[in-house]
Image (tube, rainbow, N blue to C red):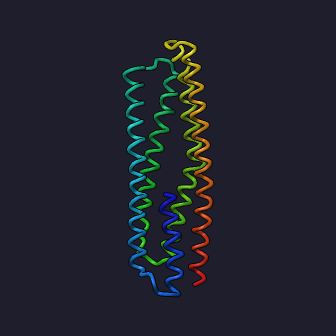
Amino acid sequence: MDEELKKLQNQWKDAKSSIKSADIEISDIIEKAKKNKKNVLYAHYGNMLILTMALIMITTFFYYVTPFQQLISKIGVVLMIGGLTLRILIEWISSIRSKQIDLTEHAIRSVDNSLKFYQFRKRIHGPVTVTIVGLYTLGFYMLTPEFSKYIDLQWMIIMDVGYVIGAIILITQIRKGIKKEMVELAEIVQMRKELTAL
């Protein structure tokens, strides 16, 4: 998605200079933007595919390999599966909203729609994703008491420490994504201001 925004911004800068010099055709800009939008849709579909595969694997594991018996473990499983399901739903909604951006409509309206979409994605990458990761982590650790019945202590420690390391890496990536989204939103707002000034 970052690449699409950068390309759109570059096209916007090119378009601004083309208004003055008439060197760049608007239809070329629209075609490039459509191509970039298509790439973003593929990214959403790829995310949905990966998350769905993870959901199927986890569900299969919990159902066939380790059918948990304790209530706390069952709640943990629901939190983990529910978090993945929610994230898949969010990616699906994002793909629908991305499709609704009409790049051929009036420039100000198109930038406004893009701004709304990126603000939506900012909320998703921020508090919503942190909440989903938090609930997933809580669910994971709720499985620990029942796992400890079947797994040696050393492997439990390795599993728990490995999860913490993975969570730290994931949280760091989420923070980077939020910072990028903030910069992108500021640039879209600037494009909006420049458009209204024309």
Residue in the picture at 57% in, 32% down: 137
Task: Tell me where residue 29 appears, x and y as whole percent.
Answer: 43, 75
Q: Is residue 140 above or below residue 26?
A: above
The C terminus: image quadrant: bottom right
The image quadrant that residue 181 belongs to is bottom right
Q: Is residue 85 above or below residue 35?
A: above
Task: Tell me where residue 56 appears, x and y as whole percent.
Answer: 38, 34
Task: Tell me where residue 58 appears, x and y as whole percent.
Answer: 42, 30
Residue in the picture at 61% in, 76% down: 193
Residue in the picture at 41% in, 36% down: 55
Task: Tell me where residue 93 appears, x and y as whole percent.
Answer: 44, 53
In screen coordinates, is 33 left or right of 148? left
Count of residue discs: 0
Q: Is residue 31 above or below residue 143?
A: below
Residue in the picture at 51% in, 27% down: 75
Taking depth in this image into account, of 103 and 70 the one nearest to the observer is 103
